[in-house]
Image (cartoon, rainbow, N blue to C red):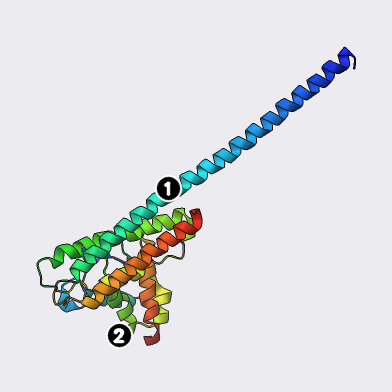
Amino acid sequence: MTTIKVALDFSREPGGRHASDGPFSGETFRGLLHRAFQKPGDVTVELDGVRGYGSSFLDEAFGGLIREGLVGYAEVKNRLVLVSERKYLLDEIRECIEDAKIYG
Amino acid sequence: MNPDQYWHTAGVAALLGAFISAVVNVVGWIANHQFSRKRQREADCGKKVDECKRLIRDFRDASYNYWLVCGDDPRSKPLEDQIYRLTQDYLGELESLKDRFSGFSHINGLSLKKSATSGDFGSVRRQANDGVRVQVQADANLLISALDRDFNSQFR
């Protein structure tokens, strides 16, 4: 199992969609997620402890993982474990994944 | 009627009267208690709904001003920080409302957040966008209307 604590392993201020938007964009985080999915076992993402997440960041990171063909929809559904005290955040990421379903 | 019968009848009548009075008092107390509880619940819910609406309006206004300027404008970054904070505030308050009062369970606050923070949100190359501003206002108004409607359907 691989665990990514966003606040510790990535940034307390994630933001932006593309890598050109800044060092802690959704696209950059997607690379971290992709590397985690290349290892065996579940991928746990602990989301709390950061300033917040824009929808552009979440869509590019989680939806983009499927849209870009890096990880299949079924694999994301089976292996991704999201941890947050904020239910709405979990709901939004699940929506990003469902919206990208047609691609993977 | 001899004196014994008189006192016996009077005693039974007095007991019956006391019993009926006690029952009326208990029923009245229960009804009053239930009514007070309902009023208290309505007041508590009303406060939470008002707080949700205030935070949604703040979020709407910050988002409106954010999409009024481009990403390289010096006003953009502080507004972006404000939007992050207000997102947690209004969605957190909405979740708390839904946890405490079941009548709001179908309300979805995410559409508003998505309207305001999708696209180029967070990019220095972001362009001011009239379409996003209009959509944010429309979604905020829809959310506020849904809160009012659900509150009224439960308590009015």
Q: For residue B61, say whether it is visible.
A: yes
Image position, residue B88 (x, y; %): 30, 60
Closer to us: B134 or A36: B134
Image position, residue B46 (x, y; %): 41, 51
Q: Determine whether label 1 and label 2 are within 8 Å by CB.
A: no
Residue position marked by numbered label 1 in the rendering: B44
Q: Quadrant of residue A70?
A: bottom left
> Label 2's element?
loop
> Label 1's element?
helix
Vertical relation: B88 (above or below) A72: above
Residue occupying the point 36% across, 62% down: B144
Q: Which amino acid lies under the numbered mark 2 shown in the image of this protein? A: Glu
Q: Quadrant of residue B137?
A: bottom left
Residue occupying the point 46% across, 49% down: B42
Residue position marked by numbered label 2 in the rendering: A68
Q: For residue A51, say whether it is visible.
A: no
Report the Cα–Cα distance between label 1 and label 2.
47 Å
Query: Please, which chain is the residue tagged with disc 2 on?
Result: A
Query: Please, which chain is the residue tagged with disc 1 on?
Result: B
Q: Residues within 10 Å of mark 2 (few under 14, many from 20)?
A: few
